[in-house]
Image (cartoon, rainbow, N blue to C red):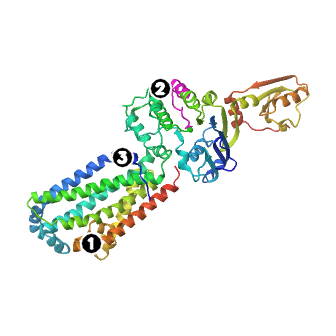
Amino acid sequence: MVQGQTLNDAIETRGLTRRFGTVEAVAGLDLTVPRGSVFGLIGPNGAGKTTTIRMLLGLLRPTAGRAAILGFDLATENLAARARIGYVPENADLYGYMRVRELIAFTRGLYPRWDDRLVARHLDLFAVPKERRVGSLSRGMKAQLALVLALGPVPELLILDEPTSGMDPLARKQFLSTILQEVTAAGQTVFMSTHILSDVERVADHVALLNRGRLVLTDRMDRLKENVKKVRVVFADGAPPDLSHWPGVRAVSREGRGWLISVESRLDEIRRRLQALNPTYLEVVDLTLEEVFIDYTGGERLALV
Amino acid sequence: MPSFNRQLWLKEWRENRWKTVAFALVMAATAAITPFTFDSVRELIKGAPVPRWAEGQLTAMLAAYPAYVWASWFGKSLFQMATLFLILYGMSAMASEVSRGTFSFLLSKPLRRGTILFSKWLSSAAAFALVTVLSTLLLYPLSRAAGHAYAIGPHLAALPMVLSSGLVVLSLTHVFSVLFDDPVKAGGAAALALLVLSIPGWFHGIRRWSLFYYFAAGPVAEDGSPHWWFVFLLLLLAAAVYTVAQRLLERKDF
């Protein structure tokens, strides 16, 4: 077990790092995914999401750091961890020559436990034909089949790597509904990487943002929406020179005659301090997850001169 | 001790089934043709100019059917065709899983990498052994049906050496199948390595240093003994080469 891990954590990483030559794909990742949560890992392309997942699955060895899944140290107890994980990859590359029922029978033989009734129910739900060759299924159907196979062993942790990419809106909705209704209701943990932020907003209760291999933000979704805001302000007598260094202020940028302040915490305190400066205009703006994402990945901290 | 997974073994058996059918058909056809070619080859050689260096070998081979059937079956057809099919089995073992993207699916399951490799290796080894033994046995009744007799004892004595040499070749092809993510490159590299290993066999004085001398059951041809000591050493070599493949697989990132 990774030092400091509690039994409530589904995933715990400490200083998890992966380098490819001189490129640091994941840099010192400290991540905690609570059991029973639906955890969205978001980030732009190349942020290190898939590399993180591949390390968690044991496909890729970390250059440094440690990780534990469901209390099992990945360096020494990888097999025990994988028996409790369901995994849906970005491209559901399955054995195309097999019929759906054959692939299910094959996968069943690789796990110590398997729920046939659950698999039959999910197949019906997604209307995946059992006699069709896997290779002839659409991309969306393959992803649905991959989800059915991942849920077959009744995993304690479901890892989804960009699961809905390439799906049409209807298939995406159905896929996410299944996760919400079936998986979270059963108390299983979902760890989902995606760049489709509306998916995360819809299903996740926790979120982490990776950028250039580094964790830039991790919080509960409700707390994130409550804390991360923008404040638009126009000062009568100029901005305080130390504004960008106020506690809770993440970034400050100029916007016309006023200033746009990115706040990551202590909103009430910041608002009080701003009001004390008698601004001519002050507005607190709620942010969508997409705006938070853009703010954290594209914004720069500007020093006030 | 390597473990194997039955489902994976069956999947490999299924994926290799057409290769196995082709291997079986080729060997059965060769076994069927061999007895009928003896007389015609002898007639053909009689009137043809034979180089002096080949004269002695040809005379010994064509003197009687037992020598002919040994030379054409163990000395040529069996190990050559088996090598080709062992490369075909091995090149697709790991590399094709990677190239078609299904290896991540397997690796995310609660399977040791060693179990995946061993299940695949065992499936190919079983197909190779089955075809080799059955086609060698088939040669006997077919020869008798064609009016030729030979003692089957030395042929049975040769099989352990042929099989253990084949396992060395199979393990070697698995090393390249782990090293390369493209089955064609893996097959090409394995073929090149085997070509290099065959070089000592081209020269009479050092032919015992060639793996193919044993794959052609050379020592058995000399005295009819199974040479268990060589068989043991070949099995050790196969295990050592297999271990290299397993170590490489365990260290590889996917």
- The residue beneath circle 2 is A125
- The residue beneath circle 3 is B10
Left or right: residue B56 compared with residue B226: left
Left or right: residue B234 compared with residue A284: left
Quadrant where the C terminus of chain A is found in the figure: top right
Q: Which residues are magenta?
A: A160-177
Task: Characterize the local packing of mark 1: few (<14), some (14-19) or many (20 or more) Cα atoms within 10 angstroms.
Answer: some
Is there one chain holding both mark 2 and mark 3? Answer: no
Task: Characterize the local packing of mark 3: few (<14), some (14-19) or many (20 or more) Cα atoms within 10 angstroms.
Answer: some
Is there one chain holding both mark 2 and mark 1? Answer: no
Disc 3 or 1, which lies upstream in sequence? 3
- Give the residue type at disc 2: Leu
Q: Is residue A103 above or below residue B2?
A: above
Specify the subunit that label 1 lies on. Answer: B
- Give the residue type at disc 1: Pro
Label 3 sits on a secondary structure element that is helix
Specify the subunit that label 3 lies on. Answer: B
